Amino acid sequence: MGSINEKEQLSENSILQSSEDVEYLVRSVQKLLEEPHAVIQSWEVEPINPGRLNFTTSGIYRIRGTATAAGTLLSWSLILKCIKPDSAEKEDVTYHNYWKREAEIFSSGILDHLPGRIIAPRSMVCSNLCCTEKRLWMEDVSRRSKSEHVWPLDDWGWIAERLGEFHGAYLTGAPLPQQEWICPSWLKSWVRGCRQYAPAIQKQAHSIWQWFNQYNEQMDKVLNTLDQLPRVLSHQDLGQGNIFMPTERLGDSVLTLIDWQFMSISGVGEELGKLFGVNASMGHIAAEDIFTAKEEMFDRYMHGLRTAGWMGDERLARYGYCVAFAARSMWEVPEWLKWVEQFQTASDINDEFNRKMSVRSQIITLQIEMSFEAAKLSHALFN
Protein backbone atom coordinates (compact mmCIF):
# COMPACT_ATOMS: atom_id res chain seq x y z
CA MET A 1 0.00 0.00 0.00
CA GLY A 2 1.18 3.53 -0.73
CA SER A 3 0.61 5.21 2.67
CA ILE A 4 -0.03 4.28 6.27
CA ASN A 5 -2.78 6.95 6.45
CA GLU A 6 -4.44 6.64 3.05
CA LYS A 7 -7.99 7.65 4.11
CA GLU A 8 -6.73 10.73 5.93
CA GLN A 9 -4.52 11.71 2.99
CA LEU A 10 -7.32 11.28 0.46
CA SER A 11 -9.61 13.44 2.56
CA GLU A 12 -7.05 16.22 2.90
CA ASN A 13 -5.82 16.17 -0.69
CA SER A 14 -8.87 15.98 -2.94
CA ILE A 15 -6.79 16.03 -6.14
CA LEU A 16 -6.12 12.34 -5.34
CA GLN A 17 -9.67 11.11 -5.59
CA SER A 18 -9.44 7.34 -5.28
CA SER A 19 -7.29 4.39 -4.35
CA GLU A 20 -6.39 4.16 -8.05
CA ASP A 21 -4.91 7.66 -7.86
CA VAL A 22 -2.84 6.61 -4.88
CA GLU A 23 -1.56 3.61 -6.82
CA TYR A 24 -0.45 5.91 -9.64
CA LEU A 25 1.33 8.01 -7.03
CA VAL A 26 3.03 4.93 -5.59
CA ARG A 27 4.21 3.75 -9.02
CA SER A 28 5.52 7.23 -9.81
CA VAL A 29 7.45 7.52 -6.54
CA GLN A 30 8.95 4.05 -6.94
CA LYS A 31 10.07 4.88 -10.48
CA LEU A 32 11.44 8.28 -9.43
CA LEU A 33 13.46 6.80 -6.56
CA GLU A 34 14.39 3.72 -8.60
CA GLU A 35 13.22 1.67 -5.63
CA PRO A 36 10.51 -0.82 -6.73
CA HIS A 37 9.58 -1.64 -3.13
CA ALA A 38 9.51 1.90 -1.74
CA VAL A 39 6.58 2.57 0.61
CA ILE A 40 5.15 6.08 0.85
CA GLN A 41 4.88 7.32 4.43
CA SER A 42 3.38 10.78 3.90
CA TRP A 43 2.70 13.36 1.23
CA GLU A 44 1.32 16.85 0.75
CA VAL A 45 -0.16 18.61 -2.28
CA GLU A 46 0.70 22.16 -3.36
CA PRO A 47 -1.20 23.75 -6.28
CA ILE A 48 1.10 25.51 -8.72
CA ASN A 49 -0.23 28.59 -10.47
CA PRO A 50 2.23 29.63 -13.21
CA GLY A 51 0.07 32.53 -14.37
CA ARG A 52 -2.65 31.91 -16.91
CA LEU A 53 -2.92 28.19 -17.61
CA ASN A 54 -3.29 26.74 -21.08
CA PHE A 55 -6.95 26.24 -22.06
CA THR A 56 -6.34 22.47 -21.97
CA THR A 57 -4.79 22.42 -18.48
CA SER A 58 -7.14 22.04 -15.52
CA GLY A 59 -4.43 22.15 -12.85
CA ILE A 60 -0.76 21.65 -11.99
CA TYR A 61 0.32 20.37 -8.59
CA ARG A 62 3.53 19.61 -6.73
CA ILE A 63 3.19 16.48 -4.59
CA ARG A 64 6.03 15.84 -2.17
CA GLY A 65 6.64 13.63 0.79
CA THR A 66 8.67 10.79 2.24
CA ALA A 67 9.03 7.10 1.54
CA THR A 68 10.97 4.23 3.05
CA ALA A 69 13.14 1.85 1.06
CA ALA A 70 15.49 -0.76 2.53
CA GLY A 71 15.08 0.83 5.96
CA THR A 72 15.98 4.32 4.77
CA LEU A 73 13.68 7.34 4.85
CA LEU A 74 13.81 9.21 1.52
CA SER A 75 12.34 12.53 0.38
CA TRP A 76 10.71 12.89 -3.04
CA SER A 77 8.85 15.47 -5.14
CA LEU A 78 6.68 15.01 -8.22
CA ILE A 79 4.63 17.20 -10.55
CA LEU A 80 1.07 16.21 -11.47
CA LYS A 81 -0.39 17.95 -14.52
CA CYS A 82 -4.09 17.49 -15.32
CA ILE A 83 -5.20 18.05 -18.91
CA LYS A 84 -8.70 18.20 -20.32
CA PRO A 85 -10.62 18.77 -23.58
CA ASP A 86 -11.66 22.36 -24.16
CA SER A 87 -13.30 22.90 -27.57
CA ALA A 88 -13.91 21.07 -30.84
CA GLU A 89 -10.84 22.52 -32.56
CA LYS A 90 -8.60 21.09 -29.83
CA GLU A 91 -9.73 17.57 -30.79
CA ASP A 92 -7.89 17.96 -34.12
CA VAL A 93 -4.44 16.30 -33.98
CA THR A 94 -3.06 18.92 -36.40
CA TYR A 95 -4.21 21.87 -34.26
CA HIS A 96 -1.41 23.70 -32.46
CA ASN A 97 -3.12 23.12 -29.09
CA TYR A 98 -4.47 19.58 -29.58
CA TRP A 99 -5.50 18.70 -26.04
CA LYS A 100 -4.10 15.15 -25.83
CA ARG A 101 -0.73 15.90 -27.45
CA GLU A 102 1.33 16.02 -24.27
CA ALA A 103 -0.20 12.79 -23.01
CA GLU A 104 0.69 11.16 -26.34
CA ILE A 105 4.22 12.54 -26.06
CA PHE A 106 4.65 11.15 -22.54
CA SER A 107 3.29 7.73 -23.51
CA SER A 108 5.51 7.52 -26.62
CA GLY A 109 8.84 8.00 -24.85
CA ILE A 110 9.87 10.52 -27.51
CA LEU A 111 11.39 12.83 -24.86
CA ASP A 112 13.67 10.18 -23.41
CA HIS A 113 16.41 10.53 -26.02
CA LEU A 114 16.46 14.10 -27.32
CA PRO A 115 19.62 15.14 -29.21
CA GLY A 116 22.04 17.84 -28.17
CA ARG A 117 21.98 19.25 -24.66
CA ILE A 118 18.22 19.62 -24.28
CA ILE A 119 16.33 17.32 -21.92
CA ALA A 120 12.77 17.01 -20.60
CA PRO A 121 11.47 15.94 -17.19
CA ARG A 122 11.33 12.19 -16.71
CA SER A 123 7.84 10.87 -17.28
CA MET A 124 6.64 8.60 -14.49
CA VAL A 125 3.21 7.53 -15.72
CA CYS A 126 0.20 8.84 -17.67
CA SER A 127 -3.18 7.97 -16.15
CA ASN A 128 -6.46 8.13 -18.07
CA LEU A 129 -9.76 9.20 -16.59
CA CYS A 130 -12.10 8.07 -19.37
CA CYS A 131 -12.26 10.77 -22.06
CA THR A 132 -12.62 13.75 -19.72
CA GLU A 133 -9.16 14.16 -18.26
CA LYS A 134 -5.64 12.78 -18.37
CA ARG A 135 -3.05 13.05 -15.65
CA LEU A 136 0.67 13.34 -16.28
CA TRP A 137 3.00 12.36 -13.46
CA MET A 138 6.52 13.65 -13.95
CA GLU A 139 9.80 14.53 -12.32
CA ASP A 140 9.95 17.85 -10.46
CA VAL A 141 12.77 19.85 -12.07
CA SER A 142 12.18 23.13 -10.20
CA ARG A 143 15.60 22.84 -8.53
CA ARG A 144 17.14 23.53 -11.95
CA SER A 145 15.42 26.88 -12.40
CA LYS A 146 16.60 30.46 -11.97
CA SER A 147 14.02 32.62 -10.24
CA GLU A 148 14.77 36.11 -11.61
CA HIS A 149 12.06 37.70 -13.78
CA VAL A 150 14.61 39.24 -16.17
CA TRP A 151 17.49 37.11 -17.40
CA PRO A 152 20.78 38.57 -18.69
CA LEU A 153 21.40 38.75 -22.40
CA ASP A 154 24.11 36.09 -22.18
CA ASP A 155 21.58 33.63 -20.74
CA TRP A 156 19.30 34.11 -23.73
CA GLY A 157 22.27 33.68 -26.05
CA TRP A 158 23.19 30.42 -24.30
CA ILE A 159 19.62 29.14 -24.66
CA ALA A 160 19.57 30.09 -28.35
CA GLU A 161 22.83 28.19 -28.87
CA ARG A 162 21.45 25.04 -27.23
CA LEU A 163 18.36 25.38 -29.42
CA GLY A 164 20.59 25.61 -32.49
CA GLU A 165 22.45 22.43 -31.51
CA PHE A 166 19.14 20.66 -30.96
CA HIS A 167 17.74 21.69 -34.35
CA GLY A 168 21.05 21.08 -36.06
CA ALA A 169 20.97 17.44 -35.00
CA TYR A 170 17.81 16.92 -37.06
CA LEU A 171 19.37 18.69 -40.02
CA THR A 172 22.38 16.36 -39.95
CA GLY A 173 20.80 12.95 -39.65
CA ALA A 174 18.79 12.55 -36.45
CA PRO A 175 15.43 11.06 -37.52
CA LEU A 176 12.39 13.29 -37.23
CA PRO A 177 9.52 11.61 -35.36
CA GLN A 178 6.53 10.84 -37.58
CA GLN A 179 3.62 10.52 -35.13
CA GLU A 180 0.39 12.03 -36.45
CA TRP A 181 -0.25 13.98 -33.25
CA ILE A 182 2.86 16.16 -33.70
CA CYS A 183 1.67 19.50 -35.10
CA PRO A 184 2.76 19.74 -38.76
CA SER A 185 2.47 23.54 -39.13
CA TRP A 186 2.44 25.21 -35.75
CA LEU A 187 2.71 28.83 -36.85
CA LYS A 188 -0.08 28.51 -39.42
CA SER A 189 -2.40 27.06 -36.78
CA TRP A 190 -1.44 29.69 -34.20
CA VAL A 191 -2.06 32.57 -36.63
CA ARG A 192 -5.52 31.16 -37.40
CA GLY A 193 -6.19 31.15 -33.67
CA CYS A 194 -5.00 34.75 -33.35
CA ARG A 195 -7.35 35.86 -36.07
CA GLN A 196 -10.20 34.15 -34.26
CA TYR A 197 -9.48 35.36 -30.73
CA ALA A 198 -7.43 38.58 -31.05
CA PRO A 199 -8.93 41.69 -29.42
CA ALA A 200 -11.43 43.54 -31.61
CA ILE A 201 -10.44 47.11 -32.40
CA GLN A 202 -12.00 50.06 -34.16
CA LYS A 203 -10.60 51.11 -37.52
CA GLN A 204 -7.73 53.51 -36.95
CA ALA A 205 -5.65 55.90 -38.99
CA HIS A 206 -2.52 54.81 -37.12
CA SER A 207 0.39 53.89 -39.43
CA ILE A 208 0.91 50.60 -37.54
CA TRP A 209 -2.71 49.67 -38.21
CA GLN A 210 -2.21 50.34 -41.90
CA TRP A 211 0.92 48.19 -42.02
CA PHE A 212 -0.80 45.45 -40.01
CA ASN A 213 -3.72 45.22 -42.44
CA GLN A 214 -1.39 44.98 -45.42
CA TYR A 215 0.76 42.36 -43.73
CA ASN A 216 -2.28 40.37 -42.64
CA GLU A 217 -3.42 40.16 -46.25
CA GLN A 218 -0.05 38.64 -47.21
CA MET A 219 0.24 36.37 -44.18
CA ASP A 220 -1.16 33.14 -45.63
CA LYS A 221 1.21 33.33 -48.58
CA VAL A 222 4.13 34.11 -46.27
CA LEU A 223 3.33 31.17 -43.99
CA ASN A 224 3.16 28.79 -46.95
CA THR A 225 6.77 29.61 -47.82
CA LEU A 226 7.87 28.19 -44.47
CA ASP A 227 7.14 24.72 -45.84
CA GLN A 228 10.24 25.12 -48.03
CA LEU A 229 12.59 25.39 -45.05
CA PRO A 230 14.58 22.40 -43.72
CA ARG A 231 12.52 20.66 -41.01
CA VAL A 232 13.32 20.31 -37.31
CA LEU A 233 11.52 19.10 -34.20
CA SER A 234 10.41 22.11 -32.14
CA HIS A 235 9.07 22.75 -28.65
CA GLN A 236 7.21 25.94 -29.72
CA ASP A 237 6.33 27.20 -26.22
CA LEU A 238 9.63 28.59 -25.00
CA GLY A 239 8.39 31.21 -22.58
CA GLN A 240 10.63 31.68 -19.56
CA GLY A 241 8.35 29.57 -17.36
CA ASN A 242 9.05 26.49 -19.47
CA ILE A 243 12.83 26.96 -19.51
CA PHE A 244 14.88 25.61 -16.61
CA MET A 245 18.41 26.98 -16.69
CA PRO A 246 21.28 25.27 -14.89
CA THR A 247 22.33 27.30 -11.87
CA GLU A 248 25.94 27.04 -13.06
CA ARG A 249 26.80 26.72 -16.74
CA LEU A 250 29.63 24.29 -17.47
CA GLY A 251 30.79 22.80 -20.76
CA ASP A 252 28.35 19.91 -20.54
CA SER A 253 25.43 21.73 -18.87
CA VAL A 254 22.00 20.82 -20.18
CA LEU A 255 18.88 22.90 -20.75
CA THR A 256 15.66 21.44 -19.33
CA LEU A 257 12.39 22.25 -21.12
CA ILE A 258 8.94 21.45 -19.74
CA ASP A 259 5.45 21.61 -21.26
CA TRP A 260 5.84 20.04 -24.73
CA GLN A 261 2.13 20.50 -25.52
CA PHE A 262 2.92 22.53 -28.69
CA MET A 263 5.48 20.09 -30.14
CA SER A 264 5.77 20.66 -33.87
CA ILE A 265 7.74 19.86 -36.98
CA SER A 266 8.74 23.37 -38.04
CA GLY A 267 11.18 25.14 -40.32
CA VAL A 268 14.70 25.97 -39.19
CA GLY A 269 14.75 29.34 -37.41
CA GLU A 270 11.02 29.45 -36.66
CA GLU A 271 11.31 28.50 -33.02
CA LEU A 272 13.99 31.10 -32.41
CA GLY A 273 11.48 33.78 -33.46
CA LYS A 274 9.05 32.45 -30.86
CA LEU A 275 11.76 32.30 -28.17
CA PHE A 276 12.84 35.89 -28.79
CA GLY A 277 9.36 37.29 -29.32
CA VAL A 278 7.48 35.86 -26.38
CA ASN A 279 10.21 36.61 -23.83
CA ALA A 280 10.67 40.16 -25.10
CA SER A 281 6.90 40.71 -24.83
CA MET A 282 6.72 39.24 -21.32
CA GLY A 283 9.59 41.40 -20.07
CA HIS A 284 12.00 38.52 -19.49
CA ILE A 285 14.49 40.18 -21.82
CA ALA A 286 15.44 43.60 -20.48
CA ALA A 287 13.92 46.46 -22.49
CA GLU A 288 17.36 47.97 -23.07
CA ASP A 289 18.59 44.62 -24.46
CA ILE A 290 15.80 43.93 -26.96
CA PHE A 291 17.46 45.37 -30.06
CA THR A 292 20.81 43.78 -29.19
CA ALA A 293 19.14 40.47 -28.33
CA LYS A 294 17.61 40.28 -31.81
CA GLU A 295 21.05 39.75 -33.37
CA GLU A 296 22.85 38.15 -30.43
CA MET A 297 20.30 35.33 -30.20
CA PHE A 298 20.40 34.69 -33.94
CA ASP A 299 24.21 34.62 -34.00
CA ARG A 300 24.29 32.15 -31.10
CA TYR A 301 21.59 30.02 -32.72
CA MET A 302 23.64 29.85 -35.91
CA HIS A 303 26.70 28.90 -33.89
CA GLY A 304 24.69 26.03 -32.42
CA LEU A 305 23.58 24.89 -35.88
CA ARG A 306 27.18 24.97 -37.12
CA THR A 307 28.43 23.14 -34.01
CA ALA A 308 25.92 20.39 -34.78
CA GLY A 309 27.41 20.12 -38.27
CA TRP A 310 24.78 21.90 -40.40
CA MET A 311 26.49 23.87 -43.15
CA GLY A 312 23.35 24.94 -45.02
CA ASP A 313 22.46 28.43 -46.21
CA GLU A 314 22.27 30.78 -43.23
CA ARG A 315 19.58 32.78 -45.01
CA LEU A 316 17.13 29.88 -44.56
CA ALA A 317 17.43 30.06 -40.78
CA ARG A 318 17.25 33.85 -40.92
CA TYR A 319 14.06 33.67 -42.96
CA GLY A 320 12.36 31.32 -40.51
CA TYR A 321 13.44 33.57 -37.65
CA CYS A 322 12.17 36.78 -39.25
CA VAL A 323 8.81 35.35 -40.32
CA ALA A 324 8.10 33.73 -36.94
CA PHE A 325 8.91 36.91 -35.05
CA ALA A 326 6.99 39.18 -37.44
CA ALA A 327 3.96 36.85 -37.39
CA ARG A 328 3.53 37.48 -33.67
CA SER A 329 2.11 40.84 -34.76
CA MET A 330 -1.12 38.98 -35.54
CA TRP A 331 -1.80 39.03 -31.80
CA GLU A 332 0.38 41.81 -30.48
CA VAL A 333 -0.67 44.66 -32.80
CA PRO A 334 -4.43 44.34 -32.06
CA GLU A 335 -3.63 44.09 -28.36
CA TRP A 336 -1.38 47.16 -28.49
CA LEU A 337 -3.98 49.17 -30.39
CA LYS A 338 -6.52 48.31 -27.68
CA TRP A 339 -4.03 49.74 -25.19
CA VAL A 340 -3.82 52.89 -27.35
CA GLU A 341 -7.61 53.22 -27.13
CA GLN A 342 -7.40 52.74 -23.38
CA PHE A 343 -4.62 55.35 -23.13
CA GLN A 344 -6.75 57.90 -24.98
CA THR A 345 -9.77 57.48 -22.69
CA ALA A 346 -8.42 56.48 -19.26
CA SER A 347 -7.68 58.99 -16.53
CA ASP A 348 -5.59 56.73 -14.28
CA ILE A 349 -2.70 55.69 -16.55
CA ASN A 350 0.36 54.78 -14.43
CA ASP A 351 4.07 54.40 -15.08
CA GLU A 352 3.81 50.63 -15.49
CA PHE A 353 1.23 51.02 -18.24
CA ASN A 354 3.43 53.57 -20.01
CA ARG A 355 6.40 51.21 -19.75
CA LYS A 356 4.36 48.35 -21.19
CA MET A 357 3.21 50.54 -24.08
CA SER A 358 6.78 51.65 -24.79
CA VAL A 359 8.22 48.12 -24.82
CA ARG A 360 5.45 46.83 -27.08
CA SER A 361 6.11 49.74 -29.46
CA GLN A 362 9.76 48.66 -29.68
CA ILE A 363 8.72 45.09 -30.40
CA ILE A 364 6.24 46.09 -33.10
CA THR A 365 8.92 48.28 -34.71
CA LEU A 366 11.13 45.18 -34.90
CA GLN A 367 8.25 43.09 -36.25
CA ILE A 368 7.79 45.57 -39.08
CA GLU A 369 11.53 45.66 -39.83
CA MET A 370 11.78 41.87 -39.81
CA SER A 371 8.73 41.48 -42.05
CA PHE A 372 10.50 43.65 -44.64
CA GLU A 373 13.73 41.68 -44.21
CA ALA A 374 11.79 38.43 -44.67
CA ALA A 375 10.25 39.75 -47.89
CA LYS A 376 13.71 40.44 -49.32
CA LEU A 377 14.96 37.02 -48.25
CA SER A 378 11.92 35.34 -49.76
CA HIS A 379 12.59 36.95 -53.10
CA ALA A 380 16.22 35.82 -53.02
CA LEU A 381 15.52 32.29 -51.77
CA PHE A 382 12.29 31.20 -53.39
CA ASN A 383 11.71 33.31 -56.53
Image: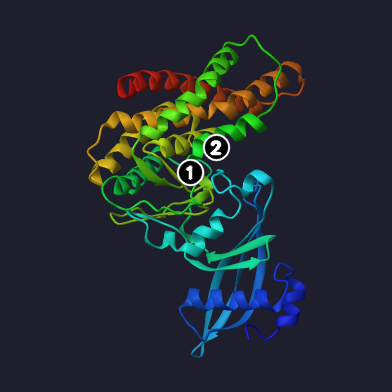
Q: Secondary structure at mark 1?
A: loop
Q: Quadrant of the C terminus?
A: top left
- Percent across and percent down for residue 256 are 43, 55
Taking the image as shown, residue 237 lies to the left or right of residue 174, namely right
Instruction: Say which residue appears at 36% left-offset and 38% top-offset.
Output: 268
Instruction: Say which residue appears at 29% left-offset and 45% top-offset.
Output: 171
- Up-down relation of residue 338 to residue 146 (above or below): above
- Percent across and percent down for residue 79 are 58, 64
Residue 77 seen: yes
Q: Quadrant of the N terminus?
A: bottom right
Callout in the foreground (1, 2): 2
Residue that carries the numbered disc 2 in the rendered image: 189
Q: CA distance from mark 1 to mark 2?
A: 12 Å
- Percent across and percent down for residue 36 are 49, 83
- Label of residue 236 in the image: 1
- Up-down relation of residue 287 to residue 31 (above or below): above
| In-front residue for pair 14/176 | 176
Q: Secondary structure at mark 2?
A: helix
- The answer to whether mark 1 and mark 2 are in CB contact below 8 A is no
Instruction: Say which residue appears at 50% left-offset and 58% top-offset.
Output: 105
Identity, as a three-letter code, of the amino acid under mark 2:
Ser
* Quarter of image, res 276: top left
- Percent across and percent down for residue 151 are 46, 42
Residue at far top of view: 205
Identity, as a three-letter code, of the amino acid under mark 1:
Gln
* Quarter of image, res 132: bottom right
Taking the image as shown, residue 351 lies to the left or right of residue 260, namely right
- Label of residue 78 in the image: none
Q: Residues within 10 Å of mark 1 (few under 14, many from 20)?
A: many
